[in-house]
Amino acid sequence: MKKTMLMAAVASVSVTAAYAGEEPVLNVYNWSDYIAEDTIQKFEEATGIKVNYDVYDSNEVLEAKMLTGNSGYDVVVPTSDFLQRQIAAGAYQKLDKSKLPNLANMDAELMQGAEVYDPGNEYSVIYMWGTTGIGYNVQAIADRLGEDYEVNSWELVFDPEIVAKLADCGVTMLDAPSEMIPAAMNYLGLDPRSTDAADLEAGAALLEKVRPSIRYFHSSQYINDLANGDICVSVGWSGDVFQAMARAEEAENGVEVGYVIPKEGALQWFDMMAIPVDAPHPDNALKFINFIMDAQITADITNYVWYANGNAASMPLVDEEITSDPGIFPTEEAKARLWGSKVYDARTDRLITRLWTRIKTGQ
Ligand code: N2P
């Protein structure tokens, strides 16, 4: 009898404990090569919360998980246009801003820019932002196009004759249809944000034309390949190309990597931290998002991954080498030629997926 009462008492204590707080676990799903080496460890030490950290390199992969639900993730980092579509589908929960005091560190202008996708910044906070431009091996280009050739145009990958001269040293593109097709449209002089089927078809036709000169479509492999000199041109994300540059320098392998925002313009995107509607640990998620918005923590990430962030307070702590690089923080002149990601309706999205399959498989 006594024993039973004791067991009941123990059971009720542990139930109370479970209600008082979440288990000290957090499941994060972020882009690959997108965090400093010690960020997770620092968060675990500061909070006692154990982090399971998984990575992806494609918005489509993340979106499939978010729209299916039950991903088990507490914090994810979709790009703003994908985020908007996922918010509309009910995939995220509103942020309890009373638990995010470090929101005061954020750059008001950039957060306002992000409101295009998330009005009132109700569901998301900027993690990092960047551009989709061209990474290249300086010597390999000079060898094939001449010492005087200036890499500053999308012609490097979209002019069939020019890219054919580079095919032997390895040209790669992102496996990101909603970034690659608009870039081709932009090169053709079309509005990269157009959803007109004829414009999208024209962009796709150009990609098909240069397809024989493309070694692969992949969105993370190119970092090491550029760094090792195994490929010579990648349409890639700003920070990733800078990471390739840094890895080559560290390896002292004689490979010099450059990054350019082409003169015709480029996509500027924002990656946003958000909490899935069915996150198992939403309070821990808020703790993590607030931790990331700490000025020093965000500066450490930018200093490691070479991506610009949206945290004004972190700026004085970011290396001068990064803040002064126009490939990472574009000049006003370059900024005027950047375009924002476009949110596609379901019909346009299906068309883009179809065109992309055709481009990749050549059918
Ligand atoms: C990090 C890639 C993040 C940029 N490897 C994609 N929006």
Image: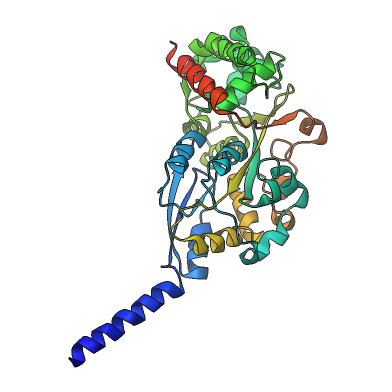
Between residues 50 and 283, which one lies in front from this camera angle? 283
Q: Residue furthest bottom?
A: 2
Q: In the image, is residue 238 above or below residue 305?
A: above
- Left or right side of 98 for 61: left
Q: Is residue 273 left or right of residue 311?
A: left
Residue plotted at (73% across, 21% down): 264
Q: Which quarter of the rendered picture does the C terminus lie within?
A: top left
260 or 69: nearer the viewer: 69
212 relative to 255, above or below: above
Residue 20: quadrant of the picture: bottom left
Tell me where residue 66 appears, x and y as whole percent.
47, 43
Quadrant of the image where one finds ligand 1? top right
* Above or below, 152 relative to 29: above
Q: Position of residue 113 (x, y in %)?
A: 73, 43
Q: How is the image coloured?
A: rainbow
Task: Give the percent coordinates (x, y) of residue 133.
Answer: 64, 28
Residue at image point 60% right, 7% down: 161
Residue 147, x across and y down, in percent: 68, 17
**Residue at the limit of the structure toward the left, as seen here:** 1
Give the quarter of the image for residue 238: top right
